[in-house]
Image: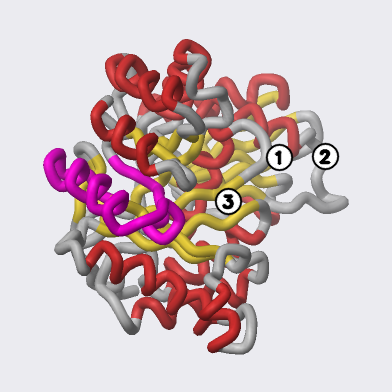
Amino acid sequence: MERRKTNKLMVGEVGVGGDSPISVQSMTNTDTRDIDATVNQIKRLEEVKCDIVRVAVTDMEAAKAIKEIKKRINIPIIADVQFDYRLAIESVKNGVDGLRINPGNIGSNNRVKEVVKACKERGISIRVGVNSGSISKEMLKKYNGVNEDSIVFSCMENIRILEDMDFRDIKISLKASDVILTIKSYKKMAELVDYPFHIGIGTVKSAVGIGSLLAMGIGDTIRVSLTGDPVEEVKVGKEILRSLNLIKEGPQIVSCPTCARTQIDLIKLVEEAQRKLEKIDKNIKVAIMGCAVNGPGEAKEADIGIAGGKGCGLIFKKGEIIKKVQEEKLLDELISEIEKL
């Protein structure tokens, strides 16, 4: 697929847009003022190769905490600021790598100018986002309610505020609870601007929404918004990119849905394999299949794999069986063979 051509900007040392790889980001759910808890969560995100992290900045204490957090982490950090321009400026002073703030929500042009000035001095980008619940009243009236036109042109209002101040280090995000409306909005925006897009969609809709947009070449950085541990957001995001062949990073697991032929505990086997394979840095495809029908035959394109039997299983490479192993030793033998590759 041909990816949409966009301007490139930097979030710390991570490129977004242009020829940069599509990045996966997440957001902490700790209190940013609790520096230790926030750093610990970001460290866990780094372990699953999160590219960028965002933190909520709710007051001055949270903004000042960024300085110490930055010293103890290795990935770029974005400050998520709502309404108070002073928090944005303080976050920039304390070393944040990017801002998520809507110019139209922080008051007068003079306030926006102060934020823009601080960002320009330090090369900080701004993400402008509009969701279906934050469309301006004027746009709702002009375009007859919530639709791709009102979402896109409400966002354009915020973009023009920055452009009028000669600021163009901009990322864009659009969101609606209706995934089809989200897709339509991004497609329309793609016709109007060449700024990079941040795509953030929650729960099961991520696979459909993010996957559909990326398959059309739209999207430069993504976040899978899940309720719970943000580490899972990164894992799902990476898996979406792998499924579209947009990254080749670490082992990719393919498994069958199980059926009456399955006579081993395949679900447990897959879950344990996922945990163990997270620590292996090889760009390989690993098949974990319930039986010989779905094993070496249907999964012959895998680099290595397991095909279950009754109390035992086969290990195969490139469709060729290499050994028969008892069920309780299957996973250990698989990992051992992977380490030899």
| Residue 228 highlighted magenta (yes or no) | no
Drawn side of residue 154 relative to residue 197, left or right? right
Q: Is residue 323 visible?
A: no
Q: Amino acid at mark 2?
A: Gln
- The Cα atoms of the two marked residues, 3 and 1, are separated by 11 Å
Drawn side of residue 86 relative to residue 33, left or right? left
Image location of residue 231, percent across then percent down: 54, 32
Most extreme residue toward the top, as rendered? 36
Residue found at x 82% / y 39%: 263
Identify the disc placed on residue 263: 2
Dot 3 corresponds to which residue?
Answer: 296
Dot 1 corresponds to which residue?
Answer: 308
| Residue 122 highlighted magenta (yes or no) | yes
Image location of residue 146, percent across then percent down: 62, 78
Asked if the residues shown at circle 1 and circle 2 are in contact, with their CB atoms under 8 angstroms apart, the answer is yes
Q: Amino acid at mark 1?
A: Gly
Secondary structure beneath label 3: helix
Question: What residue range appears in magenta?
Answer: 98-125
